[in-house]
Amino acid sequence: MQEYKPPRWPDKFLEWYCSKHYLEEVQGDLHEWHKRRILKSGKFRARLLYGYDVITYLKLFRVKNLNDMEKRSNVLFFSYLKMAVRQFKRNLAYATMNTLGLAIGLVSVLLISLYILEELSYDRFHENGDEIYRLINHNPGSGRLGDATPSPWKKNMEIAFPEILAHTRLGQDVVLVNDGERNFLENGFYWADDNFLEFFSFKILSGDRTTLLDEPNSIVLTESKALRYFNRLDVVGELMPIKVYDGNKDFLMKVTGVIEDIPGNSHLQFDFLGSMSTTSEMYGRFERIWGLNWMQAYVRLPEDQNVGALEAKMPAFFEKFRGEGTSEHSSIVFQPLQEVRLNSQNVEGKLAKGDKDNLVLFGFVAVLILIAASFNYINLTTAKSTRRGREVGMRKVLGAGRKQVIRQFYVECALQLTLAFVIAFVAVIGILPLFNSVVEKSMTSLDLFRLPVMLVMASVFIVILLLSGFYPALVMNRFKPVDVLRSNLTSVLGNRSWLRKAQVLVQFSIATFLISSTLIVVNQMKLFNNHDMGFNAKQLINIPVDDRNLQEQLMIIKDRMRQVPGVMEVTASGEALPSAMNNKWNFEWDGKSDEQGEGIYMVAIDYDYFKTLETDITLGRNISADLPTDSSTVCLINEAAYALTGWKDIEGKKVKFGGNERLVAGVVENFNYNSLHNNVAPAAYVIFGPGARVSPDNLILRMDAGNLSTALDNLDNIWREFSEQPFNFSFVDQTFARLYGDEQKFMKVLISFATVGVFLGILGLVGLVSFVAERRSKEISIRKVLGASRGEVLNQVAGQFIQIFALSMLIALPLSWFAMGKWLQGFAYSVDLTWKIFALSSLIALVITVLSIGTHALKIASANPTKHLSSQ
Amino acid sequence: MKGTHLGEFEELVLLTCALLIDTAYSVSIADEIEKQTGRDITLSTVHTALYRLEKKGFVESYIGEPTKDRGGRRKRLYRINEAGFSTLNQAKELRNRIWDMLPKYDF
């Protein structure tokens, strides 16, 4: 018998809901059916289906009737539900506004929470992730931090740091991959140490994790690249010809594995991994050059390792292995892997960084919206409930107990809240694809149901429920029925206006804060768009020349292109515009003290460079083709480099970088190679021939706006004569604008959320004013009868709001000044926080308030007093 | 006729109920229907059909003796009554009549 026993929980459930009258036969039948099913289709299926059976039996006529239930739970529950629905229907417009207001607030909060959680989830999928650290190259002298580490570190660290359990590196390289017909420039190519895929937990689809990158000429590629180049996934053993840009070397790589595409929430993003041993011939000598910072490196440390103790050993390490005195300007800092995404603002490097400040600001906005929405809801609900004193009194007269009245109000609130939450969740699921496309993430609606989100939502639900039910349930309940029924409400309600005033204050402050903060963000964006870049980016196009052989002919191509009508200027450059600048050298100058370990970026140019870019020479002269020695002995430096040297003039001054000494011919105006997040770095401009890493590999053309398309066609034709690669170009101003894509996105999202917050604030205010007016309609009418003018009444109604408004400005504006000041610190170029911005935002807040409250107040003030007085 | 109409499944249950004299209750009926038709039957649908039939006055129910098999729980047994039987008969005759009227088909 025992083995035929049905599962316990469904059975209990059946006993719970089923009335005594039916329980015996139903349970007996079900048990018998269950036994039969076990014999027929096995125990597992039968147990599974038993629960289903129990649920199918849940028919109303079998449910314990109310008398049955009374003993254990609340009989009147259904009655309360009915009352709640009736209340909702009766105040349909008001209840809908209240519910929707809350739902809109919740939608914003949910979206922002999802975004923040996504950002916080970066790099958390690696096994032992909390033991992994990124190495940061640190210059204690200048304070500069960078993610590229010196290559000889690996060779020497094992002796000095026995604590390090594992170490792995990867370095990006410019590589052309051949798909059988043509070469394609792949930006996601990295050389990686043989243990890289054992070190990190990226998912491997085929291949043996431990040996993937052991052999020279091994290559591992992602799923989507396998599909791109082979159109299938089982490509292990296939051959892939690649061409390394540096040194123009060809390799025939063998595919040893395919990995899943790198998840969006990994700070490491790559498409191809080549085995490091492949490069020993090319880059092997780098292992001995301390000044060469190329690869990113990661280590695993024991769980309880004190990182500070390791970093304390750095000076001694560098003194010993790099050379005496080098610890002044070289050191290594350990950064926990999980901080890489959000805590790397001051670390130089090409990897995409998250912005912690933006995240904090987002979170702050979410909290404000939540407060505004909850306050509205609580406020309006309690306000509305004060009008139900008579109902409560009646209930009590008819024998309702305190607890029953409390329960009734809570059931009502819970119903409305549930409705708001359901609407919010459904709306978020609907909006998510759009939101994803704006913030360029791929969050799914499943993320909504993750534990943190659910916890936050549950606690929000409970807090709002408790607070909004609190007043009606407890305060209304205290009344003596006699007082209420005699309509002696004012005496029982007492003076609660301080509470209401406080709520209005909070609403005002939130709205003002959001308005002024948004204005500051918008201003900052305007600064980006209007900033003097130091050169004229309009009608400038950039043509990358990735092929080494083509670079030899760069000057010929340049001359040909110069002939095209519509092309005004052409120049060759070692850096694209914009670019992250690739060639950094140790920088020395006349009069430099030894401890200043500074770097300078070298840019290879030709004679037409500054003419084409329209950049001013502020000191000295330009490089000239007429002086033959200029090409080998002279350079120009920018103002940033000039400032670093501390010189008074450049007369006969020399600088040294990249192993050769050059005379400084002139100083060039600073101009931005990159986004305005970064300051202009010190740079030196030299004439450089083809064939080296630094050689010019871009053509920059100033076009005439008039006949752009025919000019581009002509350029295309010229390009085809020299190269089999497709003609590729970009407009410099557009590429620069794209660098601010993140900010633009952030701004758009912030503005929309801020609008929601302001909207909610207004909603609350309007609701409140209308409520106050309704409560005081009799008083106002009597005032008018006794001769008060419209203006006086208006003053009565709106006057108190003006005081609160002024107070809220005092709270919100300094807060905004403080918070946005912090946010602006993340930019190298930021707007000044002037009083104008704050004055403007107060003005906007005031106008909105007057418009929203004023119309309402005016309506009350102009109403005919008999209307309200005759109703009694 | 409204209120006494027999659904297809109800008719099946009523028939089976008539078939299983003195032993007709939800499990035995469901069992029999499964055997006869090869359909998968949900117990609660049989139950629901029986309740309806009882309400329409086609079957009468009575509580049986407790059996060991069901942990001492008694079962509610069903018995077809005259009204039920005549309704079944009517349904059958209606069909027979129409069958008789059918022209000959050669497929």
Image: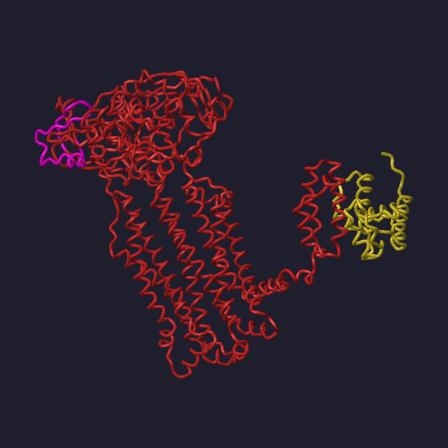
Side of A143 where B15 appears, left or right: right
- Quadrant assignment, res A77: bottom right
* Location of residue A577 in the rendering, given as x and y in whole percent from the top left corner: 28, 33
Q: Is residue A688 magenta?
A: no
Q: Does A481 appear above or below A514?
A: below
The colour assigned to chain A within the rendered structure:
red
Q: Does A312 appear above or below A235?
A: below
Q: Which residues are magenta?
A: A637-666
- Quadrant assignment, res A801: bottom left
Location of the N terminus of chain A by quadrant is: top right
Residue B81 visible in image: yes
Residue nearest the viewer, comparing A272 with A58: A58
Residue nearest the viewer, comparing A243 with A704: A243
* Location of residue A160 in the rendering, given as x and y in whole percent from the top left corner: 29, 25
Q: How many marks?
A: 0
Residue nearest the viewer, comparing A846 with A490: A490
Query: How is this picture coloured?
Result: by chain
* Location of residue A701 in the rendering, given as x and y in whole percent from the top left corner: 27, 31
The colour assigned to chain B within the rendered structure:
yellow
Q: Is residue A648 magenta?
A: yes
Q: Does A134 appear above or below A853?
A: above
